[in-house]
């Protein structure tokens, strides 16, 4: 495969590109994401986020990965996040600890802010629901916002190496607004999805632009090792990248990839040995005392279920996959690598008995594929813009593609609003329901006025002082 020419585009259009547009695009991303953060941020640690925060506190305050102190401190709010493994006598959690190291600065800032009277807002309220005062949820939330912004910017620059600035901009913003990434960047900012997405975006950025440079393979391996500690299933990204090196007979690059990966990855079985007495376990199966992984028997549900199915909750992903097919012509090795990343994550999620991810918004465990989808959608948008030589058919393809992208954004935002309305006003089903049911409920049993009230009381900067239970 030839090195990537950063000035070349697989689907070059005949018109001149405007340098000013290219220079201004990152600021457009900042404005859109900042508006999203201000409108939807929720500084309340809950559900899985409590486990990730306990890891953060253990690393930042106790300087260890022993959750005994946290189990005692958060006893009143723990339900499933941490448990005592009677066989080892150690407190364990099925949730990985890698993101704690990315969030260390936010904890230090929170500790400093906690000494200032300004940040002591409704202390009794926050202590009741999350076990700590507002600063300890506010600053990690802002940290998640920053990581999300970096992930989107990296995805944009990765896509821009093979597509136009305009197509890359549209794609990175559309997929941020119309996939679970928006939800887990704001409403549930304490989970590890945004951390995983940032690492994936950095990995894809290096893969797209620097895979011809030998040292880049070590850095990709290191990022994959970190991704393993952040979200264990993300280590599967190493497989297609390793296969790419094998196909190109790049033995030195493959060794560097493995070396970089092992530099951090060894700590996972080491920590499992301490918590579970066995370095090769499925932690969720230990806690639940039942099988958690099977064969890929839930493929249909993962992709097409109205409950959480990827293609129904995030239909723009379908367009992105079409774009990856188009990329085969210009960048065959890259396109196959990205497609395999998607395939392996789909198979992994289809092998989990808890394939829907619990009380989730969409197929949350595939959120980290965001930069892969950005490249695919940008390729499709660029191809549609340069399709044919003019005429009615060319315009139909171009405007048809853009219309589908806009509709995808509108549908994603409507679904998000419907979901927030449903889980906060339907007391019988706070876990959510099928997307058709949530949208129907929104229009027939509720309305946008109530949705606005829900957001005012629970989400956004106006609700930071008391973001609802």
Image: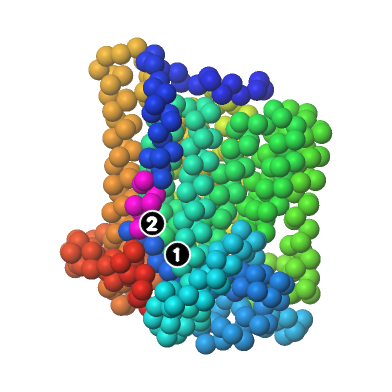
Comparing 224 with 116, the one in front is: 116
Tag 1 near tag 2, CB within 8 Å: no
Image quadrant where one finds the C terminus: bottom left
Q: Where is residue 191 in the image (x, y as percent from the top left)?
A: 52, 64
Residue 21 lies within the magenta run: no
Comparing 427 with 5, the one in front is: 5
Left or right of 324, for residue 95 = right
Residue at image coords 72%, 47%: 222
Q: Where is residue 426 in the image (x, y as percent from the top left)?
A: 28, 73
Task: Look at the magenta stretch and give its main secondary structure.
Answer: helix
Residue at image coords 45%, 53%: 181
Q: Where is residue 105 in the image (x, y as percent from the top left)?
A: 59, 62
Image quadrant where one finds the N terminus: top right
- In the rendered structure, which disc, 1 or 2, sits on the residue that comes first in sequence? 2
Q: How many labels does the image show?
A: 2
Q: For mark 1, does the 10 Å Cα neighbourhood hold few (<14), some (14 to 19), or many (20 or more) residues?
A: many
Residue at image coords 39%, 62%: 41
Which residue corresponds to mark 2? 37
The residue range painted magenta reads 31-38
- Mark seen at residue 340: none
Which residue corresponds to mark 1? 188
Left or right of 261, for residue 369 = left
Left or right of 323, for residue 196 = right
- Residue 347: tell me if it is visible: no
Q: What element carries label 2?
A: helix
Name above or below for residue 199 compared with residue 9: below
Name above or below for residue 299 compared with residue 214: below
Real-space Cα separation, disc 1 to disc 2, in angstroms? 12 Å
Question: To which quarter of the image does residue 423 belong?
Answer: bottom left
- Residue 339: tell me if it is visible: yes
Q: Where is residue 192 in the image (x, y as percent from the top left)?
A: 55, 60
């Amino acid at each position: 495969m030839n090195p990537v020419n950063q000035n070349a585009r697989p689907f070059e259009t005949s018109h001149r590109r405007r340098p000013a547009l290219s220079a201004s695009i990152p600021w457009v991303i900042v404005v859109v994401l900042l508006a999203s953060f201000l409108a939807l941020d929720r500084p309340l640690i809950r559900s899985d986020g409590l486990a990730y925060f306990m890891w953060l506190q253990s690393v930042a305050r106790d300087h260890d990965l022993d959750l005994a102190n946290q189990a005692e401190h958060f006893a009143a709010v723990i339900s499933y996040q941490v448990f005592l493994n009677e066989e080892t006598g150690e407190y364990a959690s099925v949730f990985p600890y890698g993101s704690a190291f990315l969030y260390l600065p936010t904890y230090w800032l929170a500790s400093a802010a906690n000494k200032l009277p300004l940040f002591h807002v409704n202390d009794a309220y926050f202590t009741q629901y999350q076990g700590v005062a507002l600063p300890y949820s506010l600053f990690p939330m802002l940290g998640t916002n920053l990581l999300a912004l970096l992930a989107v910017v990296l995805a944009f620059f990765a896509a821009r190496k093979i597509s136009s600035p305009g197509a890359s901009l549209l794609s990175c913003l559309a997929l941020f607004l119309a996939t679970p990434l928006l939800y887990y960047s704001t409403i549930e900012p304490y989970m590890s999805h945004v951390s995983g997405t940032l690492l994936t975006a950095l990995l894809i950025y290096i893969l797209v632009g620097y895979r011809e440079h030998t040292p880049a393979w070590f850095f990709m391996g290191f990022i994959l090792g970190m991704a393993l500690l952040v979200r264990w299933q993300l280590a599967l990204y190493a497989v297609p990248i390793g296969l790419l090196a094998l196909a190109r007979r790049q033995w030195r690059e493959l060794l560097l990839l493995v070396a970089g990966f092992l530099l951090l990855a060894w700590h996972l079985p080491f920590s499992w040995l301490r918590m579970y007495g066995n370095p090769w376990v499925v932690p969720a199966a230990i806690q639940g005392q039942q099988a958690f992984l099977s064969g890929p028997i839930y493929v249909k549900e993962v992709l097409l279920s109205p409950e959480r199915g990827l293609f129904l909750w995030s239909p723009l992903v379908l367009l992105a996959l079409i774009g990856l097919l188009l990329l085969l012509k210009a960048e065959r090795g890259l396109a196959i690598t990205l497609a395999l990343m998607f395939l392996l994550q789909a198979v992994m999620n289809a092998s989990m008995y808890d394939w829907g991810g619990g009380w989730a918004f969409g197929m949350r465990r595939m959120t980290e594929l965001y930069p892969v989808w950005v490249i695919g959608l940008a390729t499709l948008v660029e191809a549609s813009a340069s399709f044919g030589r003019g005429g009615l058919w060319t315009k139909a393809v171009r405007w048809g593609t853009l219309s589908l992208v806009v509709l995808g954004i509108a549908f994603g935002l409507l679904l998000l609003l419907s979901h927030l309305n449903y889980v906060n006003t339907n007391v019988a089903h706070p876990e959510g329901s099928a997307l058709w049911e949530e949208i129907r409920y929104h229009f027939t049993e509720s309305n946008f006025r109530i949705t606005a009230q829900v957001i005012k009381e629970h989400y956004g900067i106006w609700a930071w002082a008391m973001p609802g239970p």
